[in-house]
Amino acid sequence: MLIEAEMEQKMNGKELKLFSGRANRPLAEKIAQRLEVPLGNAEISNFADGEIRISINENVRGEDVFIVQPTPPPADNLLELLLMIDALKRASARRITAVIPYYGYARQDRKDRPRVPLSAKLIANLLTRAGVDRILTIDLHAEQIQAFFDIPVDHLYATPVLVEYHRQFADNLVVVAPDTGRANRARGFAQRLGKDTPIAIIDKRRTAPNQVEALRVVGEVEGLDALIFDDMIDTGGTLIRAAEALVKAGARNVRATATHGIFSGDAVYHLAQSPITEIIITDTILQPAAKSHPKIKVLTISALLAEAIFRIHREESVSSLFID
């Protein structure tokens, strides 16, 4: 997925402009380097009371603009993205694409009990009303979130990046879904590693938000190297309970991989004490502390996002990036 060295930066006379918020500027810089474009001149600071101040210091009239900004906590990351969209819209950008490597507030995506918000839908409404024209994101917590938007959504998967790394461990491997809801994704990941790669599923019960009791392992893991495959790691409770269940079931080794490493609270410490020997994540979220931990390896998804941005700019297919 290497972008052609002779890539043109113009389409129909309009230039590709790439801006970054403060949530993950190192990722934006890697994307800019691969696209061979400079990051746009945007001044982002805070007033004395903490309010966010945005100033776009270059002309964007009629241009094709991309903003790289994941939206993990704190909520200022989301607000910063909304303010950048508004500033660019008022500056007459021709098209604004929000590149959201991690889409926050996605876990409340359905009304499963009375008097709860549809947070994922609310965020979609806010982005659309702010004036964004297109969304580019990676591994949404639930596929149906795409339907909350009335604008185009390019939903990418980090699978190609993760598979490339894990192929070296494909022998004697079993891919493990941390719950039944992730079984289809785990199966697809296993098939990419090798058509004969087996899967197993953790049968679990969630007793409260961020609290999981792993019950049993469905599938054969005895004597195999188990790889737990999930979309995100938050407190690490799910992973730890799953790893303990796998070791009890006879797994020879337990590793874990996920697209988004949130690592709330003391997650990194607890994971370090767990039976998990290695945790592979991507750089959708900026996590300096986790990145320096010996158990955690961070892969970059900058090439994937750069290729997708280039194709969107050129009005080319994006789906071919993750469909064999």
Image: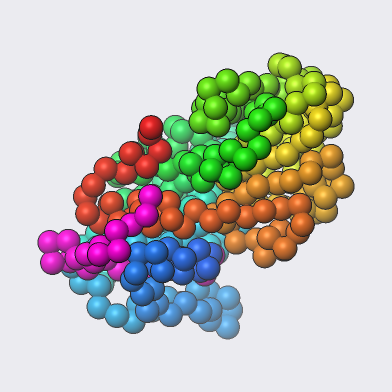
Q: Main secondary structure of the magenta part?
A: loop
**Front residue of this view, candidates 313 and 45:** 313
Question: How many numbered marks does the figure carry?
Answer: 0
Identified at 80% across, 47% down, the residue is 271
Toward the top, the furthest residue is 219
Identified at 22% across, 64% down, the residue is 8
**Front residue of this view, candidates 59 and 50:** 59
Q: Position of residue 47 (x, y in %)?
A: 53, 81
Residue 196 seen anywhere in this rendered image of the structure: yes
Q: Position of residue 31 (x, y in %)?
A: 42, 63
| Left or right, residue 58 beside residue 222 | left
Identified at 21% across, 50% down, the residue is 315
Q: Position of residue 226 (x, y in %)?
A: 72, 31
Which of the 4 quarters of the picture holds residue 219?
A: top right
Identified at 73% across, 17% down, the residue is 220
| Left or right, residue 212 beside residue 185 | right
Task: Give the extent of the magenta segment.
Answer: 1-23
| Left or right, residue 299 beside residue 308 | right
Specify whether residue 10 is painted magenta.
yes
Q: In the rendered view, how is the structure colored? A: rainbow
User: In the displayed structure, would residue 33 be above or below residue 300?
Assistant: below
User: In the displayed structure, would residue 276 be above or below residue 89?
Assistant: above
User: In the displayed structure, would residue 146 be above or below residue 131?
Assistant: above
Image quadrant holding the C terminus, namely top left
Q: Position of residue 242 (x, y in %)?
A: 77, 31
Specify whether residue 192 is painted magenta.
no
**Front residue of this view, candidates 269 and 108:** 269
| Left or right, residue 222 beside residue 54 | right
**Front residue of this view, candidates 10 and 43:** 10
Residue 126 seen anywhere in this rendered image of the structure: no
